[in-house]
């Protein structure tokens, strides 16, 4: 009996060995497999606000303009035939009107030809779509001066809550007129057709507007009007727009179908498993080199690594912490040093919500806790700024693949500087001095005790907390900082409730312009800074808001640069946060992949690639 | 009882199991001497370096860490990572030694409490019967209808990270087996003459359950419990592996394995480069579970009435 | 028999209700802000100051506990399971996409489990207390003590990392292309292996098989040890039965005594256990699928649980509870069919 | 009365030991007896005295860890203990049939009655399905099972206890064996059924001209069916004679005790006696005569030395130091008187 089994096993093994040998086909020259983590949330350009969706939409849809290669400020025409500028008169002197001549003979994947109506429809549909938690605020802000279309609706109807406008899903009669006005007086007027041109009328001068429109911003993708209506998207009418506003996920008609003008068309999207693209032969720039692009979503690093090693994947997302493992891999090319549009900071809110907040210990400066306004003392903030071993951290924890930022702005944006005076160095003595000054010396004498936070699963942020906690103890044994890792849900909740004393968090740019950073970290209404507590908000209104606004409206790059540098100086002098690091991207691919270029602005780069230019040898 | 102990000692496999258990007990008891803690919280794994990449066995403590510990007034006696360091510079040896305590804690506490819940609900259901039985058994069914690991994951995620939360989750979804076993065994014992007699004499229900029924029905539950200690530790480790277990840096074997998760395969041509990162934690878990299973398996054989007198 | 089946099936809605209610209870431990995290994966979403509030309203995150449950039940009436934010698709679709994959994996895992588990269990019992028995037993206990995540990683390391066989996932990129694109490849069963054969695509069949082997080994290894234990003890028990002695006294050959007279009896309890095990496997594929990035239910359930995506968790739980109840019923019925002594009343 | 023909089975100094963890249990420790064609031998004793083990030793169906360690079992001139397992298999069922105590558990619950009986025929006579079926139905008829055609396809649980035992008998007799071993065949049955079954066995034995070893603790059954009786105690035969002699002239205190513990109409006893004490654990038999701790006649010699099995009268073997004392006691109660009356 057992001999039979062994024989069977042996035969099976041999057959398998042979079979696999036969299967190990040479890498297909027409196909690139990209193994990464986390699949797209949607394929609707106006819904998408995650990098994975952005990557796919980038390959399928085109925008009016694109960045020139790896540049972040030079644009090239895409579906527009000219890049507007003050010089060519396509941007008005006041910076309020942008004109784009539309390219002819561009075909959509379904064979339709691009018209100027398609462009108009794309932007208007985006504006009225404006889903909760979506990206459309980026266009609404410059074009209508609001964060959300609901804001205008509420203003015109005078209701408290947007939902009050409706009864059983229908607009109440008394608000109908006002609701139509939202479209006709605002949305409709913001984007206009002029012959073969499309004109944007801005509500305010907005220096990053071109960045918002450029390829890489899925929200500005151009979709096909007729086809979209066929799918069940907004029908283009003024008196129905609210029915197409902020739908539930499953009701979004463009959630899984695509029809762009890009170099690749969608073959099949299997959520969280794979996305398969195929070359679009009628692409206006000429067909791409590759016939097929396959995205595979594989969260397990070991698996991705093996796929790369075996050549089953051509391009692979490699966490920087595991970079060393692929460095000497045969047939694998690792390039590093790419700037990314993201950085990580540790925030220190000036006033915390003390109510039910266990993170503050006793809530008093008695050695058993901290007062809610602990970080409003600049010496405390400076003390901690000196207390972090920036260089050790970058060298050891992120394997050297990061640089420091002086303030909120990453390289190579305006505001970034290498001036050493703008950096705090790890210096326990200086930290001691600052802490001795803080709270009139009381802090030094009594000590402090509070929790510092990172979101669970993030080893790098955990290391930050560990280092802070460790060195705080070194500087004064009475300083007790307890590192606490919490789930993202709890992190988010405590952040929104202004309960986190010291927390580490990152920002990934929406578009590569300092304006995406300045309000976020410094403004009175910023994503992070708005939660620093009232003292900070008041202070920011005085000190940073005017500068941010001035830079936004400025049309002069030199002036902008100067303002953002000033903001950096303010951030540094006030020690508003611990500006920890800006990661330096790495790109890992098999060496037969050619044509990679890096652009810090395209989501997914540098890990992924602009597959239009990629070919295999 | 003597017979059981004698059998356990005379059977080679269970003897190995017992010796292994003894080994772990010794480690747990003498942890402070084997691996003196350097942080105030001894369950905080000592970091030998800030390096993310694992370092091989014998790696000496990095200077920057030594400075830190010394300025904190700690005596650094053990300055080499005997088993290497895990991702993040955590000393594997330290984590494993103190993790032994964690393993015992998780295993024993979860098993004891889930057994308690199971025994209470199971015996109430079986003894009173009727709608109480129906209700309790349907509740058991409902709890059983959610896969254990998924249920535990959900609850741990909701409660937040931490060993205590893991234990709560394991108990909340781990009691049903005991309830069923004890119910079945009480149902058959309930009809025995001496129980009938006790009831006829008017002995209180509670007393009957406690003094008459349980002592006669508890054995299969105990066997199941002894075998479950190992599997509870594995489940807790699996939760850590999936990222919802003990807090980062806490001395817990599952966490040690999850540290190794990204370092299973070394660089090409040197596939086993980080062998120590998974080998040592893996071997600890396997041996620990093995020891319980060896003992439990023999125990079951001994107590299995069908196999009694054999072996 | 029929009335028994009907009675058991009537329990089903009750259990499903209980399961969903239980999960809702668990999730009601979370505040609206915490539930929000499912919809906010990166802080950029908060750039728009009203985002948080709008999301809470849109997804009814601040509904008081029973209201949320009733809301969910109502949409269920319309056969709407809701949206899975981890799968990025409707829950029902997510299930339909992943369930066949898991079924296929479990289906193939059962074969070695039953063959090896029962075969070794019988051998072990026949050679009771011999060296062979001891060796098999200890191997089984060791196997059973190996946590899946360690064993799975080991398999991945050896068979893919070193030998280069058995890649992770479900299909290679080229096969995915062949299977998913165009109308040439018909999905009859949604088991890739079967469909490949039905379509006459041996290459795809082979590709699917080699992807399955690693998970199958991992999944079955932990299970056969258990089945072996059951078979062994059941077989030992049976071999001691009087009718076995009767058979021997009749002069029946030893082989026939074991494989006809004893095994047929000994396997009756094993069938129940094996049935339960298969059901359990469907819920227990979490780690195997995670390690091998096999796109099935378990992988999805694990992600959903971690990200507190209650729609997905409930969807998964409902499906599993359904399988559990129906599966147990099937096991009971087949038990009655195998064992002439049992007649379900 | 007993027609002595050729010897079918001869057991010489049979020793069967169980090698347990706690020591060696001498379950059968030197047993001799023989049996002639057509004769019925009753093997009597309390449970645990080794009578079943003796029977299983004969057909070599001992459970682990039992082992025959000495002696000979001569069946039709050949020593069964020297045969290979294959040769044994050909003897079992064909030459030696067996009937067991529990008809409930001795039939395989998942196989039909018909299958189980015809299996014997198929094994030993290589009969085909149809042929076997006919033969089995005939057998079933012979053992008194009504509607045998229907019973053939039924499972054991569908039959009553008595029917099942009849089926067992049919199975044992299927190949017309020269020796039948019945291990407490009626113990588990109702008294009325017991009588039927005994009657049936008696008739069939005559019909098939088979010998029978009847193992039982029930003296009533033995009186009914046996020609000769061997009384076993603690692995040894303590008394061996023809049935009447045993019943009316017991010479071993143990036999004596057994007989006084059952109600008998022919004796003048005021009350039933029971033998004090218990069957000794076979792991630690007492020294000397193994019965001495329970024996009312025991003296110092009994503790020291074990008596031999010696012939007292013609064919009456007893293992006791005090045969005379027992005889006197028997007379007192009236055993012997009755014996003379009968004669």
Image (cartoon, coloured by chain):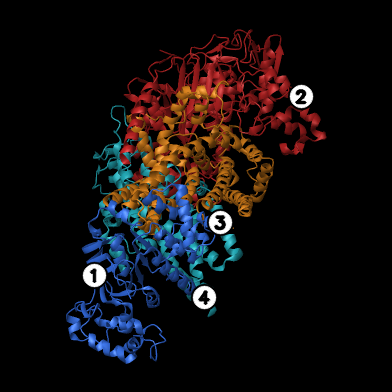
In 3D space, how far apart are the residues under numbered discs 4 and 3 (Cα atoms)?
A: 30 Å
- The chain to which mark 4 is attached is B
x 31%, y 80%: residue: D246
- Disc 3 packing (10 Å; few <14; some 14–19; many ≥20): few
Q: Which mark is residue D32?
A: 1
Helix, strand or loop for disc 1 = strand
Name the residue carrying label 4.
B196
Q: Secondary structure at mark 3?
A: loop
Residue bearing mark 3: C343
Q: Chain of mark 1?
A: D
The chain shown in red is which?
A: A
Tint applied to chain B in the drawing: cyan
User: In 3D space, how far apart are the residues under numbered discs 3 and 1 (Cα atoms)?
Assistant: 49 Å
Q: Residues within 10 Å of mark 4 (few under 14, many from 20)?
A: some
Judging by the rendered image, the residue that carries numbered circle 2 is A238
The vertical placement of D317 against A598, above or below, is: below
Labels 4 and 2 in the same subunit: no
Q: Of residues A371 and C82, which is closer to you in this image?
A: C82
Give the orange chain's letter.
C
């Amino acid at each position: 009996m057992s001999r039979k089994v062994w024989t069977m096993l042996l035969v099976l093994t041999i057959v398998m060995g042979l079979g696999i040998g036969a299967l190990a086909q040479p890498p297909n020259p027409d196909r690139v497999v990209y193994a990464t983590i986390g699949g797209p949330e949607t394929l609707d350009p106006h819904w998408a606000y995650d990098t994975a969706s952005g990557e796919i939409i980038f390959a399928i849809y085109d925008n009016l303009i694109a960045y020139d290669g790896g540049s972040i400020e030079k644009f090239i025409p895409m579906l527009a035939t000219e890049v507007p500028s003050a010089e060519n008169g396509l941007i008005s002197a006041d910076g309020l009107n942008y004109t784009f001549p539309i390219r002819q003979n561009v075909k959509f994947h379904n064979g339709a030809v691009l018209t100027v109506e398609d462009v108009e429809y794309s932007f208007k549909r985006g504006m009225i779509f404006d889903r909760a938690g979506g990206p459309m605020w980026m266009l609404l802000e410059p074009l209508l001066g609001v964060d959300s279309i609901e804001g205008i609706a509420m203003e015109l109807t005078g209701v408290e809550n947007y939902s009050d406008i409706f009864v059983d899903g229908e607009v109440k009669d008394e608000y109908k007129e006002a609701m139509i006005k939202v479209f006709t007086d605002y949305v409709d007027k913001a984007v206009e057709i002029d012959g073969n041109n499309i004109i944007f009328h801005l509500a305010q001068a907005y220096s990053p507007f071109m960045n918002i429109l450029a390829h890489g911003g899925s929200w500005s993708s151009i979709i096909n009007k007729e086809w979209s209506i066929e799918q069940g998207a907004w029908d283009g009418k003024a008196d129905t727009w609210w029915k197409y506003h902020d739908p539930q996920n499953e009701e979004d008609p463009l959630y899984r179908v695509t029809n762009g003008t890009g170099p690749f068309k969608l073959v099949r999207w299997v959520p969280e498993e794979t996305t398969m693209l195929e070359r679009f032969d009628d692409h206006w720039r000429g067909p791409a080199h590759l016939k097929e692009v396959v995205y595979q979503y594989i969260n397990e690093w070991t698996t991705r690594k093996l796929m790369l090693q075996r050549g089953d994947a051509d391009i692979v997302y490699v966490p920087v912490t595991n970079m060393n493992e692929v460095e000497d891999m045969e047939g694998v090319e690792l390039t590093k040093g790419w700037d990314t549009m993201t950085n990580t900071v540790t925030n220190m809110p000036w006033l915390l919500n003390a109510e039910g907040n266990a993170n503050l210990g006793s809530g008093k400066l008695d050695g058993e806790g901290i007062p809610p306004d602990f970080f409003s003392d600049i010496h405390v903030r400076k003390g901690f700024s000196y207390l972090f071993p920036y260089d050790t951290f970058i060298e050891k924890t992120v394997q050297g693949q990061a640089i420091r930022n002086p303030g909120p702005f990453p390289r190579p944006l305006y505001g970034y500087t290498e001036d050493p005076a703008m950096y705090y160095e790890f210096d326990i003595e200086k930290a001691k001095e600052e802490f001795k000054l803080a709270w009139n010396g009381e802090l030094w004498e009594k000590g402090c005790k509070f929790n510092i936070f990172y979101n669970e699963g993030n080893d790098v942020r955990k290391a930050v907390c560990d280092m802070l906690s460790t060195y705080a103890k070194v500087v004064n044994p009475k300083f007790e900082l307890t590192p606490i890792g919490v789930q993202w849900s709890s992190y988010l909740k405590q952040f929104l409730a202004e309960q986190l004393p010291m927390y580490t968090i990152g920002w990934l740019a929406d578009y590569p312009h300092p304006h995406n950073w300045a309000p976020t970290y410094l403004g009175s209404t910023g994503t992070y800074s708005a939660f620093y507590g009232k003292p900070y908000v008041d202070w920011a209104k005085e000190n940073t808001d005017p500068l941010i606004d001035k830079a936004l409206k400025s049309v002069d790059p030199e002036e902008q640069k100067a303002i953002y540098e000033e903001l950096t100086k303010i951030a540094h002098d006030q020690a508003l946060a611990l500006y920890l690091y800006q990661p330096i991207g790495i790109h890992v691919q098999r060496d037969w992949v050619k044509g990679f270029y890096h652009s810090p602005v395209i989501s997914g780069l540098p890990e992924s690639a602009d597959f239009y230019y990629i070919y295999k040898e | 009882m003597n017979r059981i102990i004698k059998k356990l000692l005379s059977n080679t496999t269970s003897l190995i199991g017992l010796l292994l258990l003894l080994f772990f007990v010794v480690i747990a008891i003498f942890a402070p001497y084997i691996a003196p803690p350097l942080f105030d919280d001894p369950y905080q794994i000592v970091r030998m370096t800030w390096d993310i990449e694992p370092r091989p066995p014998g790696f000496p403590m990095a200077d920057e860490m030594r400075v830190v510990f010394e300025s904190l007034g700690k005596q650094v006696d053990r300055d080499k990572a005997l088993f290497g360091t895990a991702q993040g510079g955590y000393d594997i040896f330290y984590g494993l030694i103190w993790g032994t305590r964690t393993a015992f804690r998780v295993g024993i506490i979860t098993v004891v409490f889930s057994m308690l819940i199971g025994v209470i609900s199971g015996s109430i259901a079986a003894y009173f019967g009727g709608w109480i039985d129906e209700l309790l058994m349907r509740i058991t069914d409902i709890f059983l209808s959610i896969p254990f690991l998924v249920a535990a994951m959900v609850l741990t995620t909701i409660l937040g990270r931490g060993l205590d939360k893991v234990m709560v989750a394991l108990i909340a979804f781990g009691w049903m087996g005991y309830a069923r076993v004890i119910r079945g065994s009480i149902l058959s014992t309930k009809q025995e003459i001496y129980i009938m007699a006790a009831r006829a004499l008017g002995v209180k229900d509670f007393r009957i359950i406690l003094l008459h029924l349980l002592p006669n029905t508890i054995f299969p539950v105990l066997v199941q419990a002894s075998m479950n200690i190992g599997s509870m530790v594995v489940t807790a480790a699996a939760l850590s592996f999936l990222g919802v277990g003990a807090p980062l840096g806490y001395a817990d074997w599952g966490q040690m394995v999850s540290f190794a998760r990204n370092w299973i395969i070394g660089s090409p041509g040197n596939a086993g480069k980080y062998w120590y990162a998974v080998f040592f934690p893996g071997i600890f878990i396997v041996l620990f579970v093995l020891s319980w299973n060896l003992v439990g398996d023999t125990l079951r054989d001994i107590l299995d009435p069908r196999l009694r007198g054999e072996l | 028999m029929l009335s028994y089946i009907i009675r058991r099936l009537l329990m089903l809605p009750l259990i499903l209700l209980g399961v969903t209610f239980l999960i809702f209870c668990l999730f009601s431990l979370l505040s609206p802000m915490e539930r929000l995290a499912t919809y906010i994966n990166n802080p950029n979403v908060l750039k728009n100051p009203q985002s948080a509030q709008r999301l809470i309203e849109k997804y009814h995150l601040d509904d008081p506990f029973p209201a949320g449950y009733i809301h969910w039940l109502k949409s269920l009436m319309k056969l709407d399971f809701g949206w899975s934010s981890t799968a990025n698709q409707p829950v029902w679709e997510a299930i339909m996409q992943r369930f066949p994959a898991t079924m296929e994996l479990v289906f193939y895992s059962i074969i070695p489990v039953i063959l090896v588990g029962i075969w070794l269990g019988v051998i072990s019992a026949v050679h009771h207390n011999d060296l062979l028995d001891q060796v098999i037993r200890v191997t089984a206990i060791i196997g059973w003590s190996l946590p899946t995540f360690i064993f799975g990683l080991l398999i991945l390391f050896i068979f893919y990392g070193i030998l280069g066989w058995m890649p992770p996932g479900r299909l290679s990129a080229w096969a995915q292309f062949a299977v998913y694109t165009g109308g040439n490849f018909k999905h009859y069963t949604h088991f890739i292996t079967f469909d490949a054969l039905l379509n006459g695509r041996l290459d795809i069949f082979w590709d699917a098989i080699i992807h399955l082997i690693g998970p199958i080994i991992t999944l079955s290894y932990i299970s056969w040890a258990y089945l072996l234990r059951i078979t062994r003890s059941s077989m030992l028990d049976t071999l001691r039965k009087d009718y076995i002695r009767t058979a021997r006294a009749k002069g029946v050959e030893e082989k026939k005594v074991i494989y006809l007279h004893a095994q047929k009896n000994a396997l009756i309890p094993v069938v129940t256990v094996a049935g339960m095990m298969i059901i359990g496997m469907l819920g227990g594929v979490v780690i195997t699928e995670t390690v091998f990035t096999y796109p099935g239910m378990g992988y999805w359930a694990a992600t959903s649980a971690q990200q507190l995506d209650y729609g997905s968790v409930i969807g998964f739980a409902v499906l599993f509870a359904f399988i559990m109840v129906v599966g147990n019923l099937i096991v009971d019925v087949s038990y009655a069919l195998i064992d002439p002594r049992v007649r379900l009343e | 009365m007993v027609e002595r023909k050729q010897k079918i089975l001869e057991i010489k100094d049979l020793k069967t030991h169980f090698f347990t963890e706690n020591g060696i249990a001498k379950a059968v420790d030197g047993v001799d007896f023989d049996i002639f064609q057509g004769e019925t031998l009753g093997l009597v004793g309390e449970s645990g005295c080794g009578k079943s083990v003796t029977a299983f030793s004969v057909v070599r169906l001992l459970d682990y860890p039992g082992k025959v360690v000495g002696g000979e079992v001569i069946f039709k001139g050949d020593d069964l203990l020297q045969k290979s397992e294959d040769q044994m298999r050909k003897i079992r069922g064909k030459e030696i049939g067996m009937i067991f105590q529990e008809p409930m558990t001795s039939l395989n619950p998942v196989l039909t009655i018909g299958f189980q009986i015809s299996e014997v025929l198929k094994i030993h006579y290589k009969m085909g399905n149809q042929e076997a079926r006919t033969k089995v139905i005939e057998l079933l008829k012979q053992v008194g099972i009504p509607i045998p055609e229907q019973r053939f396809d039924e499972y054991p649980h569908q039959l009553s206890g008595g029917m099942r035992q009849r089926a067992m008998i049919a199975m044992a007799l299927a190949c017309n064996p020269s020796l039948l071993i019945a291990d407490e065949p009626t113990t588990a049955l109702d008294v009325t059924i017991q009588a039927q079954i005994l009657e049936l066995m008696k008739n069939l034995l005559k019909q098939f001209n088979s010998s029978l070893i009847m193992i039982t603790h029930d003296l009533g059954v033995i009186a009914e069916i046996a020609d000769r009786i061997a009384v076993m105690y603690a692995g040894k035969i303590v008394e061996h004679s023809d049935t009447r002699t045993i019943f009316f002239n017991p010479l071993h205190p143990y036999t004596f005790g057994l007989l006084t513990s059952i109600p008998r109409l022919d004796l003048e006893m005021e009350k039933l006696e029971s033998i004090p004490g218990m069957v000794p654990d076979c792991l630690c038999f007492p020294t000397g005569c193994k019965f001495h701790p329970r024996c009312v006649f025991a003296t110092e010699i009994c503790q020291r030395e074990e008596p031999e099995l010696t012939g007292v009268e013609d064919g009456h073997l007893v293992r006791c130091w005090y045969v005379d004392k027992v005889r006197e006691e028997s007379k007192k109660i009236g055993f012997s008187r009755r014996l003379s009356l009968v004669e």
